Amino acid sequence: MGAYQRRIWQALAMQTIGALAAVAVVAVVVSRARQLPLAAVLLGLTLAGALLVAGGLPWWRRIDEMEREEHVHSWYEGSLLGGLVALLWMAGLTAHSGAHRELGLGASLCFIAQGFAYLVFWAIRRLGRRSHGAAQ
């Protein structure tokens, strides 16, 4: 195995450890959610997300530009399409059965959060590119 492959496997191992730690945090927070204040629940879930991101950063930094572009496009196109399908299915399920309104609301909020996060990151990148261009 070459040095590049070894670095990728090490980074993936680190990501796996981060993901397992995040799952542990989520399990503890969710199991005790009713006893904890809302701020503690949200903080715990935010910590779990940070563990996932921190675990994935070494891998992201080690892959080449072509692989990054493939992942970015796949995530963008796949997550938006998946979110839209989930939203439409939950709307259909709710309309058909009258049940699972909370599930439909959750899918809607997920899709709205994806769209909002996309807009925030797009705006940051766009403004960064403009300020970088103006400085030259």
Image (tube, grey):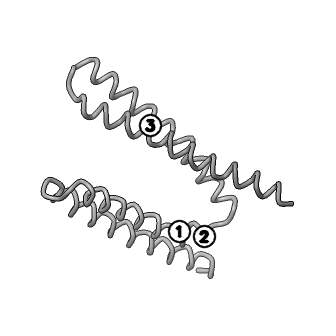
Q: Nearer the viewer, residue 124 or 72?
A: 124
* Residue, far top: 96
Looking at the figure, which quarter contains the N terminus? bottom right
First along the sequence among labels 2 and 3: 2
Question: On the picture, is 40 further left or further right than 2?
Answer: left
- The residue tagged 3 is 112
* Residue, far right: 136
Residue 57 tag number: 1
* Crowding at mark 2 (Cα within 10 Å: few <14, some 14-19, many 20+): few
Q: Nearer the viewer, residue 69 or 118?
A: 118
Per the model, the C-alpha gap separating discs 2 and 1 is 6 Å
- At which x and y percent is residue 121? 58, 50
First along the sequence among labels 3 and 1: 1
Looking at the figure, which quarter contains the C terminus? bottom right
Circles 2 and 1, Cβ within 8 Å, touching? The answer is yes
Question: On the picture, is 50 further left or further right than 123?
Answer: left
Q: Nearer the viewer, mark 2 or mark 3?
A: 3
Question: On the picture, is 132 further left or further right than 83?
Answer: right
- At which x and y percent is residue 35? 13, 57
Instruction: Residue at 62%, 67% (x, y): give it.
Output: 63
Per the model, the C-alpha gap separating discs 3 and 1 is 25 Å
Numbered disc 1: secondary structure: helix
Circles 3 and 1, Cβ within 8 Å, touching? The answer is no
Question: In the picture, residue 6 is in which quadrant?
Answer: bottom right
Q: Nearer the viewer, residue 113 or 104?
A: 113
